[in-house]
Image (cartoon, rainbow, N blue to C red):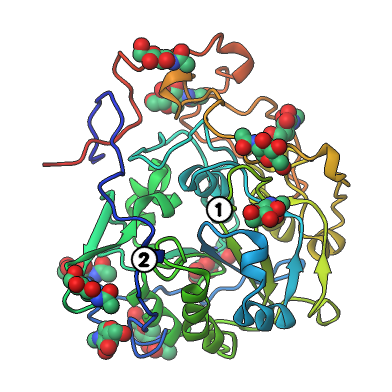
Amino acid sequence: MLRSLLVFGVICASSVPRALAATAWRFSGPATSPTEQTGNYTGFSNNTLQDTHVVKGKAFNRFIQIWLENTDFEDAGSTPAWENLAKRGLLLSSYHSLTHPSEPSYIASVGGDFWGLHNDDYYHIPENVSTVIDLLEEKNISWATYQENMPTDAFYGYSHSSTNYLNSSAVDYPFYMRKHNPLEIYDSVSQNPARQGRIRNFNDFANDVVNGSLSQWIFVTPNMVNDAHDTTTDFCADFLEYWLYPLLDDDRFNSDGTIIVLTFDENETYAKQNRVYTLVLGKGLPRHLVGKTDDTFYTHYSLLSTVEANWGLKNLGRNDVNKTMSNVFDFVAKKSGYKNVHVPEEKRPQLNVTGVFAGPLNPQMYLPFYAPEDLQIKGAGGQGVYVADSLDTSAKYSTLGDAQNLTTTPYPWIVEEES
Ligand SMILES: *[C@@H]1O[C@H](CO)[C@@H](O)[C@H](O)[C@H]1NC(C)=O
Ligand SMILES: *[C@@H]1O[C@H](CO)[C@@H](O)[C@H](O)[C@H]1NC(C)=O
Ligand SMILES: *[C@@H]1O[C@H](CO)[C@@H](O)[C@H](O)[C@H]1NC(C)=O
Ligand SMILES: *[C@@H]1O[C@H](CO)[C@@H](O)[C@H](O)[C@H]1NC(C)=O
Ligand SMILES: *[C@@H]1O[C@H](CO)[C@@H](O)[C@H](O)[C@H]1NC(C)=O
Ligand SMILES: *[C@@H]1O[C@H](CO)[C@@H](O)[C@H](O)[C@H]1NC(C)=O
Ligand SMILES: *[C@@H]1O[C@H](CO)[C@@H](O)[C@H](O)[C@H]1NC(C)=O
Ligand SMILES: *[C@@H]1O[C@H](CO)[C@@H](O)[C@H](O)[C@H]1NC(C)=O
Ligand SMILES: *[C@@H]1O[C@H](CO)[C@@H](O)[C@H](O)[C@H]1NC(C)=O
Ligand SMILES: *[C@@H]1O[C@H](CO)[C@@H](O)[C@H](O)[C@H]1NC(C)=O
């Protein structure tokens, strides 16, 4: 059952503490190690995934993306922990976010569009809108998302507060936020019982690593302090030393053919182009690229096209097939035969713009959810568009007419919190 009601208006996130950068908080590990469960997270794991089947890709066999928060490019690159990581990986120096604030970039990275969204409110996206999960499952490629401090698998709430393990005299802290858990926002994933068990927390992660059953496509969201959102780049660097460093040396995580993408949702400074520090790590990275820089223009949509190219997947027919916006990671493009486009600096779209795009998640400039414009288009995987059974393929953007202002009429895509 969809736990949402049709209401209008927008739920504000302003009650949530932000910017703890000013406090004296110091990083401390929530668990003994990333492969141990801990009571500092609410829900212990009840099971492990059973993903031992490997579908070989053209350039890699496992794709792990780790999302960090709100950090300017130079700021990230200047810390010793990041310099050290950069020596072990490939720096993507022209990788860009899509807009501001967080939630739109997260949902776009799995669904190919941010649907006009320009805030972090409590939305859901109807079941006829497809995501990368549909593309992966068609090829039997296993997947999971790990959300630190999410209390239970596929938790639907807007946020979750739990024991403040950094300060035992402080009240519970909202370590988990739905806005950073994109697959939970798509009904096609969160309302599908067979998929719910793959929206997991970090205790599940520990269990899955130890069990040797990590999936082939993985989306990782550290909590609100570890991802730098409420803290600082230095705090986040300490988290990476605690969490990522040991995992890079762990074959159960970084196995042969594994690619790890470490990225930030957005640049902190809105007034600047939205370039974000992004590293590719892992045993699947060709040796000659270690310690190097690739200045190809990429965006978060490249996370879709790269995966499509690697496994010969269908596409979503959204911005994952927009040639300007979705260059495939160069070493993957070379192996799959995909031709990237050169996008010189002056031709790059302004990706720091927010609030002016019409779409279903913009109540002031509302359009219903629409089908991909060109259902015949071939994407980076060399295949056609994935079309969900429930999609009305005649409702294309070009047929919708003008956007409407729904601020005084019921607005369908906001979730009302249960009281
Ligand atoms: C919870 O986190 C604190 C701070 O890092 C740590 O001292 C404590 O051992 C952790 N508890 C468990 C059960 O891992
Ligand atoms: C799909 O993957 C599962 C394990 O995840 C495996 O048992 C099954 O044989 C695979 N099916 C095909 C058609 O490859
Ligand atoms: C991101 O923010 C930093 C700090 O303000 C700025 O120097 C940088 O130019 C911004 N954008 C890019 C393209 O890195
Ligand atoms: C495991 O099951 C218990 C009881 O149903 C539940 O409280 C807990 O949240 C579950 N753990 C996860 C990670 O979902
Ligand atoms: C811990 O929390 C208490 C209660 O909110 C606060 O007074 C104290 O300053 C905090 N300590 C640190 C190091 O932030
Ligand atoms: C993984 O977990 C399954 C049960 O969920 C169990 O049958 C299997 O033995 C475990 N494997 C390892 C290596 O722990
Ligand atoms: C986006 O960044 C450019 C500089 O790269 C700046 O000129 C422009 O004003 C910014 N736009 C917004 C909406 O902040
Ligand atoms: C591709 O994306 C850019 C930036 O959002 C946009 O300006 C352009 O119109 C898009 N192209 C197509 C074919 O949709
Ligand atoms: C939409 O309507 C509201 C309420 O009447 C108004 O405040 C807002 O400016 C309108 N927005 C646009 C983009 O027309
Ligand atoms: C998708 O489903 C929603 C909810 O039922 C509906 O409003 C919308 O028109 C549908 N769009 C398409 C293109 O199927």
Q: Are marks 1 and 2 in contact (CB under 8 Å)?
A: no
Above or below: residue 198 compared with residue 392? below
Q: CA distance from mark 1 to mark 2?
A: 28 Å
- In the picture, the quarter occupied by the N terminus is top left
10 Å crowding of disc 1: few (<14), some (14-19), many (20+)? many
Q: Is mark 2 within 8 Å of ligand 4?
A: yes
The x, y position of residue 72, in whole percent, is 61, 58
Residue 352 versus residue 146: which sits nearer the camera? 352
The residue identified by callout 2 is: 200
The mark closer to the camera, 1 or 2, is 1
Q: Is residue 387 left or right of residue 325?
A: left
Q: Residue at x 35, y 75 (%)?
A: 25
- The amino acid type, in three-letter code, at marker 2 is Arg
Q: Residue at x 28, y 48 (%)?
A: 158
10 Å crowding of disc 2: few (<14), some (14-19), many (20+)? many
Q: Residue at x 67, y 64 (%)?
A: 74
Quadrant for residue 174, please give it: bottom left
The residue identified by callout 1 is: 268
